[in-house]
Amino acid sequence: MCPQDMLTVALRDWDGASATALRAIYQQHHTEPDFTPALVAACKAADTESAATWLIKHQCEIDGAALLPEMCATVYAMLPKFTHWAARLHILQCVDHLPIPQTVADTVLSFVTQEATSTQKLIRAWSLYAAAQLAVQHPRYQSDAQALLAAAADPAPTGAVAVRLRKARALLDV
């Protein structure tokens, strides 16, 4: 079995909860030449998307490494197609490390606009932050991001949500 297939099996076998198990998968596979492309490919399957996106997030946090632009475009294009909320959250949490290519900027705006009113507080907060990052990277979205922050921001955020909203507002200077 080739290393890419072994990675896919490991992602499928993940219990859906253990960060320790995901870190072990990362340690075992991250030096393989096709590791990152294999993770991006695994984002396309419902049974591996949460594990794959967690590993992409982990790789960004460890290395600060960004994906190649075409990989970023693929991952961002997958945002509205993810079946699990955790996969969405993981990619939103990578927005500082993964530039948003112009080719998928409208897709990202549509997604974060929809999720800016999510009942899940972390998804909502990270969507608003992603909208601000989108505006920083592509200034034509400045007014859209400001409108989202004004309309969807939690009036009394707490914890991680408060931090993310404060950072989003700081990016836009609002």
Image: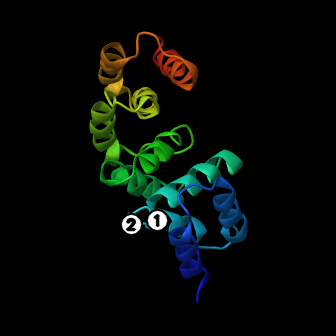
Q: Quadrant of residue 142?
A: top left
Q: Is residue 54 above or below residue 166?
A: below
Give the secondary structure at mark 2.
loop
> 12 or 96, which lies in front?
12
| Residue 50 or residue 16, whichever sits in front | 16
Find the residue positioned furthest to the bottom: 1
Rendering quarter of residue 150: top left
Which three-letter amino acid code belongs to the residue tagged 1? Thr
- How would you rate the neighbour count of disc 1 (Cα within 10 Å): few for under 14, some for 14-19, many for 20 or more? many
Q: CA distance from mark 1 to mark 2?
A: 6 Å
Q: Which residue is mark 1?
A: 48
Dividing the picture into quadrants, the one containing residue 25 is bottom right
Labels in figure, total:
2
Q: Type of residue at label 2?
A: Ala
Residue under the image location 50 percent in, 20 percent down: 171
- Residue beneath label 2, please? 45
Q: Neighbour class for label 2 at 10 Å: few (<14), some, many (≥20)?
A: some
